[in-house]
Image: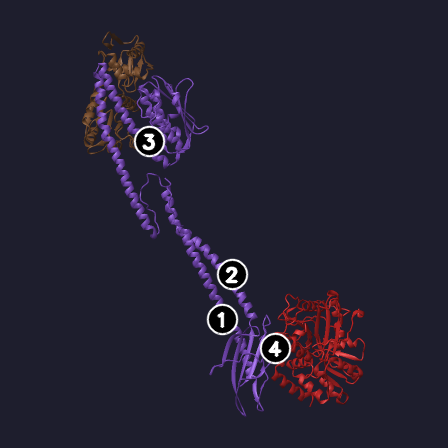
Chain colours: A purple, B brown, C red
Amino acid sequence: MSEIVRTSGSLRKRLMITLISGAAVLAIVLFLIVRGYATQIAQNGQDNILSASVSSLLDAAVVQDGTVEVDFPYSSFSMLDTELDDRVFYGIYQDGRLLSGYEDLPRPSLKDGERRSFQTLDYAGTTVRLASAKRTLVGATGRTEISVSIAQTQDALSQTLGDISQTVTLFGTGFFLLIVLLSYWATTVTINPLMRLAMSVQRRGPQDLSPFRKEVPSEMVPLVSSLNTLMGRLDHSLTQSEDFIAEAAHRVRTPLATVRSYADATLQRVTKKQNRDALRSMVRAIDESSRAASQLLDHAMITFRADHLEKKQIDLVALVQELVVRLAPIAEMKDVTLDFAHDDVVTTKGDIILLQNAIRNLIDNALKYAPNESDIYISVKSDPNPNVMVLDQGPGYPVEDFDNLTTRFARGKNADGVVGSGLGLTIAKDVAVAHDGDLLLSNHEKGGACAILSL
Amino acid sequence: MKYLLVEDNHELANAVCSRLEFDGHVVDHADKLQDAIAYADTSEYDLILLDINLPDGDGRTFLKHHRDRKQITPIIVLTARSQVSDRISILDLGADDYVTKPFDHSELQARCRAVLRRNSGAVQTILEFGDVAFNQVAGQLMIRGELVNLRNRELRLFELLLNARGQIFSKQKLADRLFSYDEDVSENAIEVYIGRLRKHLENTNLVITTHRGLGYRLDDV
Amino acid sequence: MRYFITVIAMFFTWSASAQDWEDRSVFSGADTSQSLRVLSSTDTSFFEPIINKFRIAYPNVSVEYLVTTTAEIDKIFRASPEDYDVVISSAMDLQLKLVNDGYAAKIANVETPDWAKWRDSLFAFTIEPAAIVINKAAFLGHKIPKTRQELIQSLRARPALFQDKLGTYDVRESGLGYLFATQDARASETYWRLMEVMGGLGTKLYCCSGAMIDDLESGKIAVAYNVLSSYAKARKGQDTSIEIILPADFPTTMMRTAIVSDSTINVKNAENFVRHLLDIQSEGQKDATTSLPSLFLNPGEQTIPLEPALMTYLDRLKRKTFLLEWERAIVQ
């Protein structure tokens, strides 16, 4: 039944991997964007302060008596104080000539018309942000251009960015983890209808080939409808073959019944021993063939059902009671009494059709071998396990081939003269095993076969 | 007893009819579903033997129709389907019992008797011969108002002889009727049953006489 | 302890032997290979106890202690930073600029308040307000001024008495004097008025606090403006003729600072020296063996903050403008 199905990865895993890698990419992109944005904002902040500082220096520039004075306020540099005490470099130039400040500071690279510029460059062994601006002064001697550059290291900026990066990383990781959780949830939700379908296919009884009616997501409609089509075809062909077997049985059995009835009737009229024996052989042959057909069908059915065992709560007492009633007329024919004893309540889990068949076979056997005017003792007990015992007063099982009795088509040596196919005990044994039980055969000490079906 | 046999196979039907008539029953035979329904609606039967596969329908339709009309006449289904599931569905539809084709007439008779006994509330035919009273359906023999415990074979032997009073039955014939074909019964066994029955009938109006070389006969004195 | 301090007349030919040191002391350790050159503007007598303590903790290290003015320190050190291991100066602005220009090494994990350090390179170790110091004799029967404004009034009230009897730093020579002057000027216009008044009375200009206090004691001058209170207090212990006034209008408080040269090869020892210095100075209580004020700030008190703005008055143009104005006021 459980054939190995080749797998090509898990749908759920694939979905998870897709979602998670998507989330990872998204988290990284988010991280880069936020970090980039934060860098820009932080840089803008530094630029604004540098710009203000440059402006205050430029504003202080005046031409006095032909010379340039730049009496800039204390606050020009004071405003550049940072948490991490960033270093400050500056240069004040008149027409490109250094008036004051750091000689080696890169000159401002202001294009024509540009009033302000910002550059990031390496200076004094570190990365600095350089802000520059210029202004034209008009004095008595003419025009002169004053430009100012202020550079600041980026320690505080880096720390701020580091802090932001850390926070963003934390958020990104959180976002990623959340997405992982969400994708787990999403895949579960997505996969669930498929799982439910699989479960409901699994849970179905062996006979249930009806189409699935439950609502399924639209993506699963093709699958479910082809499944339904397949089951429809299966159901159809099963019904057809069942019908065919039933029809075949009918076709064979009815003429057999006719022949048997005639033989039976003829037997009543014929007195010559030779003829009577011939007729009796004929009838026996008919009975044997029909019984063999029945049991073969039963056995096939039992093999099928045992593979797809449907366990239900069963009242074992009621089951055996009904069988006893059903078989009483046959027992009566031989003046055999069916003596039924049982515990008050004996229940078990199992397939009612299988159990009925198995127990019927056991009682049938007992009826066949029981002598006239004898008793067949049938008991149903719950201790230690639910069990059914059938004990007759016949010759008992042949001791020499005890082990072979439950194999197919094996019949006891003493079965000559008794109609049977040799499948009865096999069926009972198979049913017992299918229910995790066993069929125990023994001979009673006072003679008679004892069969115990324990579950 | 009045039987209705619903069976489309005429040869089988003939065989069953002749056998039942041989046992002293009246049998109507219908070979179609429609006829069967018509018969059942117009006459009263003690027992209906019903085949499932009919040319114009399913015997189960008859079963349903019958039970829907609250008819209590017992029905034994003759089926060619031996599968357990079929048997169960037949019983669920209201049949009293079933016999799988091909069947042993003795088994059919036994089942008929069992079914009739179970439904004996309907008709009680009691035959009385002096201080002997016999309820055929229930299979009860009363002698001087007391119930006699007869074994099944004794009962059937008595019934056989009683229904054909004054007729001589050979040991062979009696054995054929009482035992299944595959039982090898010595004629001594018949003598044992006759002996037992005689003992029960001592000092009554009914006497079993032995006719050497011919057999036995029951007489109403 | 004095017995193992040896002041050695050096006969080695140092590269800096041509330098005119105000003072030069060598405190030799057990291992001559390990030596520290400390460039300082603080008088040896103030620093000796600290060096001695350091030598107890690190007996193997010799310390050469070189004293000169703050302006000289800046010049000498910038010229050859690899020759000196630790630089100690009272000119906060010059020290800060040394750090800004990359002459100082970072020292990690130094336990000192944020306001007392800059870039983990510049470490303050004293709190020293600038004071007005007067000769009490000149104010007998007169109110002792508590603020700069009151000082101006006192001077104007008796100009004859104070004529040529005033002193202050020559800010052109003294880095500390320049720092005090620029901070005063930044804080209030009163500074310029005081300078004009003092200039009108023929103020004497000094290179250092020590010289001002000397003249105060001898009665050469009656008032000294912007004297280091620590020096004055050290001297007052011996003399009761002078009085130290911390101006109540606004205090100008300086911090002495130390840096480790970025070019030194004695990194470990230099760091240890600074750490040790801070340990001693931040203990808070006056130690009998040190006469330097500790690094302790009362609530509400402020010092000149360590910030890039300190470089403002070091700007060539600003300095030129400031000195011009100062000379116009005081030299006249």
Residue type, mark 3 in image? His
Please say if C257 is above or below A310: below
Image quadrant occupied by the C terminus of chain C: bottom right
Viewer-closest of C58 and A187: C58
Return the disc, 1 or 2, that comes first in the chain's sequence: 1
Query: In the image, what residue occupies the spot 26% across and 23% down?
Result: A285
- Disc number for residue C224: none
**Classed neighbour count for the residue bearing mark 2: other residues with Cα under 10 Å, few (<14), some (14–19), many (≥20):** few
- Which amino acid, by three-letter code, is at mark 4? Ala
The kind of residue tagged 2 is: Leu
Q: Residue at x 35, y 24 (%)?
A: A363
Amino acid on which disc 1 is placed:
Gln
Direction top: furthest residue: B212
Position of the N terminus of chain C, as image quadrant, is bottom right
Q: Are marks 4 and 1 on the same chain?
A: no
Give the labeled residue for mark 2. A170
Residue B79 rendering spot, x and y as whole percentages: 26, 29
Chain under label 1?
A: A
Task: Determine the secondary structure under disc 4.
Answer: helix
- Contact between labelled residues 2 and 1, with CB atoms less than 8 Å apart: no
Q: Chain of mark 2?
A: A
